[in-house]
Image (cartoon, grey):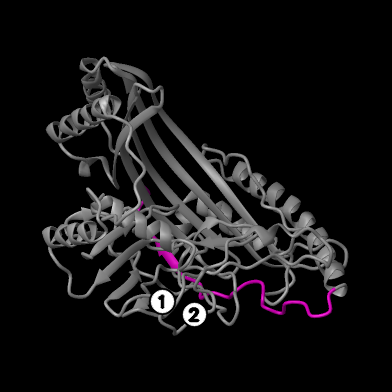
Amino acid sequence: MRKLAGVCAGVALSAIGGWAVSAAGSAPDARTDTQLRAMLDEIARSKTLQLNNLDKPYFVQYSTSDAQQVDINGSLGGLTSSAHVHLRRPRVAVRIGDYKFDNTNSIYTGNTLLGLFPIDDDYQVMRADLWLTTDGLYKAATDQITRKRTALREMEEPDKTPDFAPAKPVQVIQPIANLKLDQKHWEGVIRQLSARFTTHPNLTESHVRLLTIGSTYRIVNTEGTTVRIPQELTKVEIVSSGLAAGGSRVWDHQFITVLRPSQLPNQQELDRAAEAVAAETDALIKAPVAEDYSGPVLFEQEAAAQLMANALTDAIRLQRKPLAPPGTNNPGSQMIESVWATRMASKVAPDWLSIVDDPNEQQFRGTVLAGHYQVDDEGVPAQRVVLVDKGVLKGFLFSRLPIGDVTASNGHGRLPGGWGAEAAVIGNLFVHADGAVPEAQLKAKLMEKVKTAGLKYGV
């Protein structure tokens, strides 16, 4: 097996390096940012929240994704849509109780879906929006923690794992994202790429899409963290499909993902990619139905990276079931538990295999890594995590949700999870094999196995 770089792009995607984490309270630029100023002032007010003699919030966090987005779609030489949209999406978290026991991680904890944040830089309107949301979530939290306490009284041996992990406050203030894209130029490119499919009449459907996002992500919480980081993501999707002789649908695609539009391939390379997708779909339409196959399979290039990512996604993170009273249908029972959950410090792979997740890496052998990020969605700096070292399981990916004996995040809380928690996910996953061999030698080994098994061919 060759050395592979598997890329998993999540929520926070950034192309700007050279950032620094400073002590809390040392980011004067934050006050010049209208959004951050409104968030900071409302965070200060939220610390005084209390309804009658009920629990007070011990942790409140505001985050917003301030995104400029261009989405261009084309088919058969014409544009089907072209839009430039400005969206601000807020997220508000309110925890009452304390780090050991709060209103989250029970079947009574819901995930709140919020509307949009004002796109006008109106300080008072922003504060009013945050105030109303915080007030509503606080009242919901008081009900959640009451029901959770009642459920605990019905349990003989309740789980005493803390509900939230403290984190050191950080200050990261970077320039606001600036989306640079010549929309008219790219409309012409999308027209030209999609026109490639007009010379392939056997295809029943095709489309080409350019999506580019320039976003500024902001986080403020009551621990003292203040974050403003730029995020960028650009991708080109080329897809086509058709009907084979037997009536089954066949399709092919190519997705090109980078951070900035300037990193996309040039016009000639994009033309070749579109023509390749069209030609391969055409060939699939005419190809006979493959016979059933049971034998050795060699995974190459993107397929090898995707295979490892899919196989490891649930293995390298632990999940925690929400608290539920006895006899209750617990939705957490449907959660996929890591096959390595009880294998810490044990052999889980051959001696020659090592696996590391490192979101701090921006490139791998000249390829831009879309899984690069600086700070996760919980305000924790990204960390390099050794998962498997020479076949031995060394660690897992964690958010601020304590699981088992682990009560600290390693900067991988990047997607909304269930029951008020953040899910830990892959950033840049590197799979390294000692004693790697050339691709030709791998194919020779495949053919040896094919002959040994008495097969006519391998895959």
At label 2, the amino acid type is: Arg
At label 1, the amino acid type is: Val
Check disc 1 and report the residue beneath it.
348
- Image quadrant where one finds the N terminus: bottom left
Residue at 67% x, 49% y is: 112
Alpha carbons under labels 2 and 1: distance apart: 7 Å
Residue at 17% x, 29% y is: 271
Q: Position of residue 77 (x, y in %)?
A: 26, 16
SS for tag 2? loop
Q: Main secondary structure of the magenta part?
A: loop
SS for tag 1? loop
Residue 373 visible: no
Crowding around mark 1 (Cα neighbors within 10 Å: few <14, some 14 to 19, many 20+) is: some
Q: Which residues are magenta?
A: 155-178
Contact, CB < 8 Å: mark 2 with mark 1?
Answer: yes
The residue lying toward the viewer, choosing from 374 and 437, is 437
Tag shown at residue 343? 2
